[in-house]
Image (cartoon, helix red, strand yellow):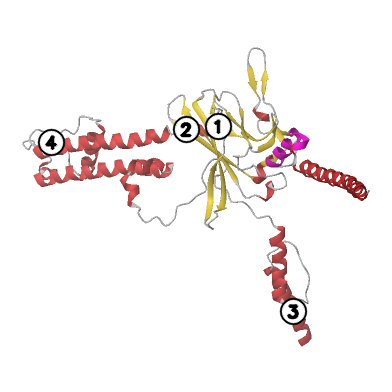
Amino acid sequence: MAKLTESMTNVLEGDSMDQDVESPVAIHQPKLPKQARDDLPRHISRDRTKRKIQRYVRKDGKCNVHHGNVRETYRYLTDIFTTLVDLKWRFNLLIFVMVYTVTWLFFGMIWWLIAYIRGDMDHIEDPSWTPCVTNLNGFVSAFLFSIETETTIGYGYRVITDKCPEGIILLLIQSVLGSIVNAFMVGCMFVKISQPKKRAETLVFSTHAVISMRDGKLCLMFRVGDLRNSHIVEASIRAKLIKSKQTSEGEFIPLNQTDINVGYYTGDDRLFLVSPLIISHEINQQSPFWEISKAQLPKEELEIVVILEGMVEATGMTCQARSSYITSEILWGYRFTPVLTLEDGFYEVDYNSFHETYETSTPSLSAKELAELASRAELPLSWSVSSKLNQHAELETEEEEKALEEQPERNGDVANLENESKV
């Protein structure tokens, strides 16, 4: 019985050890110690599992950054209008309703206090008494009169009299403050409704970026398009490389931003976005991809953030659309499928093929290596280093051979001179 209990305990301990292993690969080594059994699969999983790259900007354009430990929260209240506009719709609507309800209740309470202090509540059915507000017989009626006053409804049942100067002053204050509240809240709602963020939903980027040859040069390309018939005015495109770096002094700069030239100097970054366009970045000596080859690209931890800006034609407000590409979304040796076709009297864009690519013949070398090969092919043979060395060696050999040939001749001349002197 003791042996049976001991064997059951060993089995249970073995199961618990297997559960502690953080690896999908089941490794059955019951004779290993617990520490070895725990560590071995972790090393295997750590080697086999590919580390996921954390995005700086998500594909939908939202920045994946959260601000924490902000102590100076009062700064949000100094710009209360922008704070309200930036709030989510549910909170904005809640504040909208609460502001109006609180103001109505506040002024309704004041109207009731004026009537109560004047004694209007004690002379409700007295025809000889002139109240501050006619037909105001309680807090509910005061609240309704406050709503009528601020919203300028004026049903005509409750009316302020000229025998109440304090009521006249309160009427002026509520009218002014009510106009301010209306302007503030309606303006906030209008700005939030007319925000161009939703306009950016119809500006699309290709799901992948590609690297291939264009006009004999290695280029990084991605595609942008506009789904609406109303165009983006003064559209421009920018691109940033997000990659951590370490300076020569040893300083580590996380998420360093480097500009990627997409035609700034030639004007190609200013777009006429009527149909989808392919944005091209030439990989030259100023490019951050100058020394990156096809084999090295998957090992890089980088992210390309693309930003499309312009004015909405309907509203004139500035709109910005963003997207990003990580290394797994950059296809080496591919091109985009054409989407524009000529129909009878017009051009048609097929957005079903907007994200499609096809493979093309592209060298796997980096742009730097391709430039070196091209320079060697274009230069004359005598300009290459190896040929220079060979020519230098051949000249030296020829000089040595000439020296050896001249030496016996000189020796023969010396011997003839000696014989002549003897004679």
Q: CA distance from mark 3 to mark 1?
A: 62 Å
Q: Amino acid at mark 3?
A: Asn
Disc with the residue nearer the chain's start (2 vs 1): 1
Q: CA distance from mark 4 to mark 1?
A: 55 Å
Residue 5, relative to residue 117: is it above or below? below
Q: CA distance from mark 3 to mark 4?
A: 90 Å
Disc with the residue nearer the chain's start (4 vs 1): 4
- The answer to whether the residues at label 2 and label 3 have Cβ atoms under 8 Å apart is no
The circle on residue 168 is 4
Quarter of the rendering containing residue 157: top left
- The answer to whether the residues at label 2 and label 4 have Cβ atoms under 8 Å apart is no
Residue that label 3 marks: 10
Disc with the residue nearer the chain's start (2 vs 3): 3
Tell me if residue 360 can be seen: no
Q: Is residue 254 left or right of residue 168?
A: right
Q: Amino acid at mark 1?
A: Leu
Residue 295, relative to residue 154: is it above or below? below
Q: Main secondary structure of the magenta part?
A: helix
- The answer to whether the residues at label 2 and label 1 have Cβ atoms under 8 Å apart is yes
Q: Which residues are magenta?
A: 368-382
Specify whether residue 287 is painted magenta: no
Q: Amino acid at mark 4?
A: Ile
Residue 145 screen position, x and y as percent: 21, 37
Residue that label 2 marks: 319
The circle on residue 203 is 1
At 23% across and 30% down in the image, what residue appears? 155
Q: Quadrant of the N terminus?
A: bottom right
Q: Is residue 355 left or right of residue 149?
A: right
